[in-house]
Image (cartoon, rainbow, N blue to C red):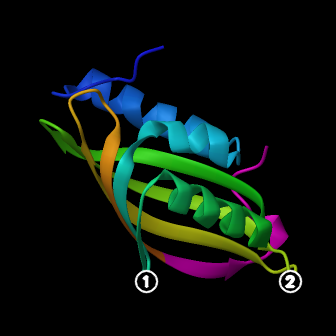
Amino acid sequence: MNPIAPPFNEQTARAKVKAAEDAWNTRDPEVVVKAYTADSKWRNRTEFFTGREAIKEFLKRKWARELDYRLMKELWAFTGDHISVRFEYEWRDGKTGQWYRTHGNEHWEFDDEGLMRIRDMSANDIPIKESERRYRG
């Protein structure tokens, strides 16, 4: 299947966000990395890196620590080849067992084929009780 490519309208932007949510919820770096250009540039909190191999290594580290990860993404804005989303995800710390809900936003830029060439992410983690979880699955 070909990626959803820009220029985006509301329908295609929402579909792109849903596809990203579904891919990330697999927790499979090999699945997730297919949405990015070979030289994709990322900022994830305080980490900056470039390329699919770096993305895969980041995701492996992330999901080794963030157990039972479950994500929700929501379209915030779009124009041309850009999409911005807000997100929440919940996870259990692999070392302490503490549950967290992470709130944040991402700003995406795509190439003409619909692969993400820039991902800029900011987030904050809030400790929660397991009984306060919103996302399961």
The residue type indicated by label 1 comes to Thr
Which residue, given by chain and number where applicable, does mark 2 sit on?
95
Could you tell me if the residues under marks 2 and 1 are in contact, i.e. CB atoms within 8 Å? no
Residue found at x 40% / y 26%: 15
Q: Is residue 1 above or below residue 23?
A: above
**How many other residues sit within 10 Å of disc 2, few (<14), some (14-19) or many (≥20)?**
few
Vertically, is 40 above or below 54?
A: above
Magenta stretch, residue numbers: 124-137
Closest to the observer, 132 or 40: 40
**Residue at point 49% right, 51% down?**
52
- Where does the C terminus fall, quadrant-wise? top right
| Category of crowding for the residue at label 1, using alpha-carbon neighbours closer than 10 angstroms: few (below 14), some (14–19), many (at least 20) | few
Front tag of 2 and 1? 1
Residue in the picture at 28% in, 26% down: 113
- Dot 2 amino acid type: Lys
The residue carrying mark 1 is: 46
Q: Residue 130's x, y, as percent?
A: 83, 69
Q: Secondary structure at mark 1?
A: loop
